[in-house]
Image (tube, helix red, strand yellow):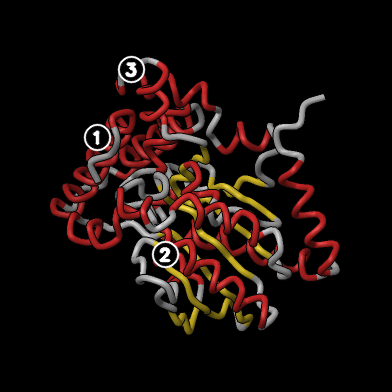
Amino acid sequence: MTGLDFEKPIVELEKKIQELKNFVSDKKIDLSSEVRRLEDKLEHLKKDTYGNLNAWQKVQIARHPQRPYSLDYISLLMADFVELHGDRLFADDKAMICGFATLDKEKIAVIGHQKGRDTKENLKRNFGCAHPEGYRKALRVMQLAQSFNLPVAIFIDTPGAYPGIGAEERGQSEAIALNLREMMLIATPIVSIVIGEGGSGGALGVGIADRVAVLENAYYSVISPEGCAAILWKEGSKAPEAAEVLKLTAQDLLKMGIIDEIIPEPTGGAHRDHQKSAQNIKEVIFKNFKELKAIDKDELLRLRYNKFRSIGVVQ
């Protein structure tokens, strides 16, 4: 792991510790006290670094190429996943994963943006930027979930909806707007979790939920820091400043009442321990599904509507 710029002292110390352990193993020398000293130093360095991240550093972690994506969480948390394809109008969008699975014997619907690990897969997944058919496919699955009285779990991880000419010609804005309206009326519990990037309408198009949670180092914003910098300062290099003023971190969002809770990540980010991150998400999904299923359907829809209508209200 090469690490991000601000992680380089941590990566270098981790490398030094590993080299020392290898040397001890090869030479059969007892240097356990030195190893423990360096490990203690590493632990303090991690706490100091990751406990004081600024908004731009959190954005960098949210975009880390080894961060778990939707399919990773599905494979770690769920069984019997059956993916559904196509919107019954145009095509199947590979940037939006939709289907049904079991979560500890409970049948659920699951939806999520999906990025790629390499260039070939990113081209296939369109870098996690969904076309209108992706949002229509997601709505189709949510309506199926309602028909079978199944709760819906949604993983959000996109820089934004795809802005290409073809997507616009096929009604990108209409597809997202339709989802905003129709998700208010889906009479089954919906929990959405921002696992990486939560970019603009591309995120909100599957983000209308009874409970919205954000991973500790993920972000949720009306625009990317680079896009904001290009508009306000006419230069992308101002992205770190834009990240600060956008108030896009999980901590800022919770203070403003835009999200319901923050899901902790392993020290250093979700990419350092996929299993632990998945377990933390599972606990949040279970807790919220249990609470939401106890609410009458009419009341559930009323609370969901009021939740989003109250965002941005200032007295």
Q: Nearer the viewer, mark 1 or mark 2?
A: 2
User: Label 3's element?
Assistant: loop
Near mark 1 (Cα within 10 A), the count class, few <14, some 14-19 or many ≥20, is: some
Residue farthest toward the left in the current orientation of the protein: 27
Sequence order check, earlier mark of 3 and 1: 1
Q: Nearer the viewer, residue 103 or 45?
A: 103
Q: Nearer the viewer, residue 224 or 176?
A: 176
Residue at numbered disc 3: 234
x 63%, y 63%: residue: 285
x 43%, y 78%: residue: 83
User: Label 2's element?
Assistant: helix
Question: In this picture, is 61 found above or below 139?
Answer: above
Residue at numbered disc 1: 12
Residue at numbered disc 2: 133
Near mark 3 (Cα within 10 A), the count class, few <14, some 14-19 or many ≥20, is: few
Q: Nearer the viewer, mark 2 or mark 3?
A: 2
Near mark 2 (Cα within 10 A), the count class, few <14, some 14-19 or many ≥20, is: many
Q: Amino acid at mark 2?
A: Glu
State the separation of the CA atoms marked 1 and 2.
Answer: 45 Å
Quarter the C terminus occupies? top right
Q: Give the image quarter of residue 9.
A: top left
x 36%, y 50%: residue: 162
Question: In this picture, is 275 found above or below 200?
Answer: below
Sequence order check, earlier mark of 2 and 3: 2
Q: Amino acid at mark 1?
A: Glu
Marks 2 and 1: in contact by CB < 8 Å?
A: no
State the separation of the CA atoms marked 2 and 3.
Answer: 33 Å
